[in-house]
Image (tube, helix red, strand yellow):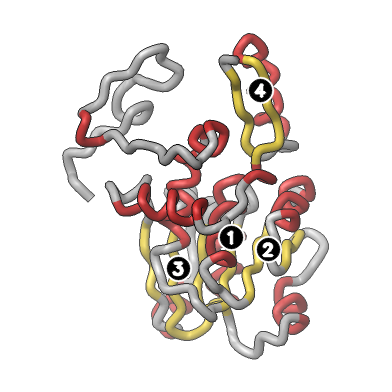
Amino acid sequence: MCRNTIGVGVNRPGCFAEYLVIPAFNAFKIPDNISDDLAAIFDPFGNAVHTALSFDLVGEDVLVSGAGPIGIMAAAVAKHVGARNVVITDVNEYRLELARKMGITRAVNVAKENLNDVMAELGMTEGFDVGLEMSGAPPAFRTMLDTMNHGGRIAMLGIPPSDMSIDWTKVIFKGLFIKGIYGREMFETWYKMAALIQSGLDLSPIITHRFSIDDFQKGFDAMRSGQSGKVILSWD
């Protein structure tokens, strides 16, 4: 939350640099029992953990809008820490299938299924207790507001258009709490990420492609296609 934070690759160059200098205070040593592949996705995994663990999830019904890799990891975290039902929505069937492989309660293609029908199928007589908005898509956020329980809590990582309009009466009369998420918390999020993996959270299905660094263009093409999870480039 420091107003003087400078993000590498955001506020100053650094992405894809051969060497990078950062303050030693900011460095986090990856435990030896966490693989290099998982360490390579700790940055987006941190976004997922920061978002998912913004609120108490034990026994709660959680809606995740947006089944990109970060959304899927957030849903997996929610399930791992004890959420009751975790429902993730998207229109990309490849990504939804990835979510199913991660053990999410229900992965819903909202172009084909009605979310209210899914809630009824799960025996949900009230709305979702927690919403994790990962998509930045206005229709997805509006659906989330429609299906939240009174007193529900929403964490927003997705960045919507600046002119997005919503029905604010739903926020007010439902007593919803909305929290914005940026990056990770130093150093709490890093410790939680390591602990989640060491306690059995399996992120391996989210890594779908591996390429040599010489084939970096294939990696970018896979990401842009929408038919991938996380893509790993190897220097081996």
Within 10 angstroms of label 2, few (less than 14), some, or many (20 or more) residues? many
Q: Identify residue for label 4.
A: 219
- Report helix, strand or loop for mark 2: loop
- Where 87 sits versus 61, above or below? above
**Marking on residue 104:** 2
Instruction: State yes or no: discs 2 and 1 in contact (Cβ < 8 Å).
Output: yes
Residue 57 percent across, percent down from the top left:
48, 73
Residue 49 picture location, percent across and down:
45, 54
Residue labelled with disc 1: 75
- Determine whether 50 is above or below 83 in the image: above
* Disc 2/disc 3 C-alpha distance (Å): 19 Å
Could you give the CA–CA distance between mark 2 and mark 4, rounded to whole angstroms?
A: 26 Å
Mark toward the viewer: 2 or 3: 2
The residue tagged 3 is 154
Q: SS of the residue at dot 3?
A: strand
Between discs 2 and 4, the one toward the N terminus: 2
Classify the position of the C terminus by image quarter. Answer: top right
Please rate how many residues cluster around mark 1, counting C-alpha atoms within 10 Å: few if below 14, some from 14 to 19, many from 20. many
